[in-house]
Image (cartoon, rainbow, N blue to C red):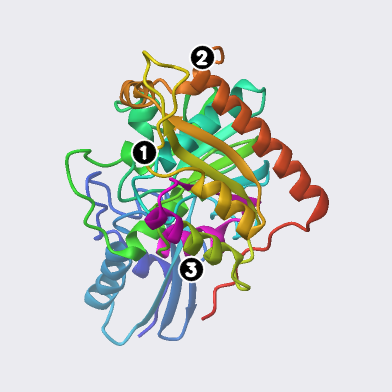
Amino acid sequence: MDLYPKLILDALATVRYPGTGKNIVEAGMVEDDMRISGLHVSFSLIFDKPTNPFLKSIMKAAEAAIHAYVGKEVEVEVKSKTLQAPRPEVGQLLPGVKNIIAVSSGKGGVGKSTIAANLAVALAKLGYKVGLLDADIFGPSMPKMFHQEDARPYAEPVNGRDLIVPVENYGVKMLSIGFFVDPDQAMLWRGAMACNALKQLIGDANWGDLDYFVLDTPPGTSDIHLTLVQTLPITGVIIVSTPQKVALADARKGINMYQNDKVNVPILGLVENMAWFTPAELPQNKYYLFGKEGVKRLAEEMRVPLLGQIPIVQSICENGDKGTPEALDETGPMGQAFMDFARRVVEETDRRNAEQAPTHIVEVKK
């Protein structure tokens, strides 16, 4: 049997691309790199992106068509090429980002997302270029906190790649998995699926130039945290806790995770959230509902800075639900508290950068 290009192309012309009605030859999907050697033929098929849902099925159909219309004895080698440039390697994902700050907590319910949202807004009000990634894949809350629940991010072409455009509000660029899923449905994802989604929000988005990239991480220690330290060189971590002993025990675990020799991400400091309760009608009064200065004592014990003590007031809950973070009002007492907190974060980040080497990405052991 003699093989020649037209024979192969005629066979490939029987393969149609779903939804367009055109065959893959007519659609220009067959690359001009066909090689024939005896009964061996190799060629490439061009797809719009690496994640094309029909990529594998079309490649198999092309091989089957040659066996059916040319001969079963033909050895077929089908390769794929994509028009979209590949995602940059780990370590080169965010070249325009100066500082990556993770906001973390040992347990849920301590107000970590509230701290992260207000930190991002306060940094923006201080004049910095700020991005915020809602890395809490299973419990995204940033769309509500930024009053962007109805936002649907789109992609735009950038240097041969289709990149997601972050939603922007209050001077902060922000992305969350909450923009891409049904808010009323539970996220029944395995760890690998959640980690891949997180990598897309990081590496397939047009974050641009940022002074601070704030990561709102999930509570506890999980696959998501490992993915973050294996994907990004995190400048430093802020640990959020409430003053009671059960929260402090979990905060200690969070600190130990980042200080582990294999992770080795600097702790910028601790934040004591819900430090005391102040009723609106008695603004001078302080009621220590969860204990007094537990996080302050932990910071002293662990020899890390205390970045702030944030009281619990009714307006924090109300403004969080309305999507208007407290830091927007610099003149109010809570706004001032978050602005002071942001200034301390800047101060500690600058000190960390001056005194310590850049953070290394944790290597993945195969």
Quarter of the rendering containing residue 285? top left
Q: Amino acid at mark 1?
A: Leu
Residue 153 vertical position relative to residue 187 in the rendered view, above or below: above
Tell us which disc is closer to us: 1 or 2: 1
Please state the horizontal and vertical placement of residue 222, each as a whole percent of the image.
Answer: 40, 63
Q: Which residues are magenta?
A: 223-250
First in sequence: mark 3 vs mark 2:
3
Q: Are marks 1 and 2 in contact (CB under 8 Å)?
A: no
Q: Residues within 10 Å of mark 2 (few under 14, many from 20)?
A: few
Q: Earlier in the sequence, mark 3 or mark 1?
A: 3
Three-letter residue code for mark 2: Gly
For marks 3 and 1, give the one nearer the viewer: 1
Residue drawn at (49%, 22%) of the image: 334
Q: How many marks?
A: 3
Q: Disc number at residue 332?
A: 2
Question: As rendered, which of 78 and 37 lies closer to the eye?
Answer: 78
The residue to which callout 3 is attached is 34
How far from the left and from the top, in percent, is residue 10? 31, 63
Q: Is residue 225 magenta?
A: yes
- Residue pointed to by mark 1: 289
Q: Which mark is residue 305?
A: none
Q: CA distance from mark 3 to mark 2?
A: 69 Å
Q: CA distance from mark 1 to mark 2?
A: 23 Å
Can you see residue 170? no
Q: Position of residue 295 (x, y in %)?
A: 52, 48
Check disc 1 and report its element: helix, strand or loop.
loop
For residue 241, side relative to residue 150 (left or right):
right
Circle 1 crowding by C-alpha within 10 Å: few under 14, some 14–19, many from 20: few
In the displayed structure, does residue 173 sit left or right of residue 360? left
